Image: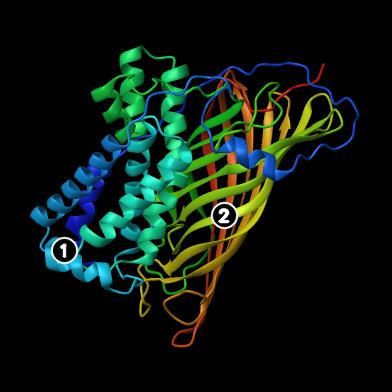
Amino acid sequence: MDASTTRCLRIRQLLLGTALCCPPMSPAMAQNVSVTGAPVLPPLESAAATSISDKTKPDAPESRKSYTIPALEILGFDFLVNRANNLFGSSSDYKVTLSSIRRNLTHAWVVDNDPFKINQFMHPYQGTFYHGFARSTGHDYWTSMGYTFAGSLLWEIAGETTPPSRNDQIASGIAGSFLGEPLYRMSNLMLERGRMSRGWRDVAAAAIHPSVGFNRLVFGEEFGGVFQSNDPAYYSRLQLGVSGLAKNDPGASTTSKRGELLIDFSMEYGLPGKPGYTYRRPYDYFSFEVTGSSGIGFENLMTRGLLIGQDYEYGNDYRGVWGLYGSYDYLAPQVYRVSSTAVSVGTTGQLWLSRENALQGTAMAGIGYAGASTLKGLGERDYHYGVAPQAILALRWIYGDRASLDVTAREYYVSRVAGDRAGYDNIVRTDASLTWRVHGQHGVALKYLFNRRDASYPDLGRRTQTRGTLGLYYVLLGQERFGAVDWRP
């Protein structure tokens, strides 16, 4: 990466910087027993009609909305990002003229070669600003996604002089909403349930989602105030720890470090089984995780949410949701990187195994568009794009309020279809974490993380990279402890 690109990256990080926090919550317990004991799986079409609206009740009055304000904000935001990069960087990519705009309007869309972190991390985060501008001016998820897609399109045509890029359009225009909606929900949850004073809650909520915070500062509650969460059951966890190498085959990578300090935040929102809670709106269920590392910066940022779906049940001991999920993943375990924007069919549920033991899980399979690369490799091009079939299986065994065991496996196959070069990448990531609550909300965790990348290219041959780490963490649990939802009598 040359000096100009580095300066541009720092400028974007300055403009788009954010922070995350972990609001606690107390669980509500209630009875919800199946009458027939038979599985109930409503048709997906019935959920599609109700998920389009963000009203909390069918007869709730519609909040005021503006179509002009978010459009002007997106236009102004793109202009400021362009001017800042043009002012502080030496690249000619931001010297936009009417001639360059006309050329981009007719130019064929390409796969660009910007640095991986800009394309696959900063572009999705830039898209969250577009999404937040629309969400905080009264629009529902789908309309806000339209604004996000349009904002990305504006940037590709008029934000840079380079030809419009389809990988950037997917990253900003689609992944921006897949990431932006969880940030919007968590920002509003902080306002709704945060235990700090109102002023500090406003600051924390703005740090989680800056564009939403900006509109709250300017317009107050003109567009409906705090988003009504409808009291979801959720599980949150903050971890601080250290990990060391247990297995390492870096391949062509030159960046692998033996040890690292880690900070990890995760939340699962809208867990199935809460009596009275419904899944009428996109992202009434979602999972979010981000990990910072002293060795690489962001080790991961992963989110998945239910776009269209419905709850179902089996007997007295199982509750679940199923439907179409949207996901955005960014993984960088020191030796390689992969990022994916995808849609999948799947289910999330909870089964009571006994009075004290519960099993929660998610299973999904779908297809997306992904990029993968060796991290600072020798003799390798930076990355490869392509259509990517993928799958995930995540399980959590919960033993009362004392302990939990989390096991997750995910796989991505980055093909040559719609890609920029021949070859493929097959990436597998698994982790297992045992958490023990010591006192109150405080606990400890032992975690093993394994990453493997198998790649094959005509010019490079077959390559394999693996990295396994073992870590010890201090854990701060939310007040909901391990997140088991109890609907039983």
The residue beneath circle 2 is 343
Give the mark toward the camera: 1 or 2: 2
Specify the amino acid type for callout 1.
Ala
Q: Amino acid at mark 2?
A: Val
Q: Residue at x 42, y 69 (%)?
A: 374
Foreground residue among 212 and 15 = 212
Q: Nearer the viewer, residue 481 or 319?
A: 319
Q: Quadrant of the C terminus?
A: top right
**Vertical order, 186 against 131 (above or below):** above
Given residues 279 and 112, the one toward you in this image is 279
| Residue annotated with mark 1 | 3
Side of 163 relative to 249 (left or right): left
State the SS at label 1: helix
Q: Answer whether residue 393 is visible to the viewer in this image.
A: no
Q: Residue at x 57, y 52 (%)?
A: 449
Rendered location of residue 27, percent (x, y): 63, 18
Residue 106 in which image quadrant: bottom left
Relative side of 122 to 467, left or right: left
Q: Residues within 10 Å of mark 1 (few under 14, many from 20)?
A: few
Does residue 354 show up? yes
Residue 257 left/right relative to 316 = left
Give coordinates of residue 69: x percent, y percent: 27, 35
Circle 2 SS class: strand
Q: Is residue 187 above or below residue 296?
A: above
Query: Which quadrant holds residue 460?
Result: bottom left
Q: Relative to 59, does residue 136 appear above or below in the rendering?
A: below
Say which residue appears at 38% left-offset and 66% top-offset: 166
As measured in the structure, the alpha-carbon distance from the residue carrying label 1 to the one carrying label 2 is: 36 Å
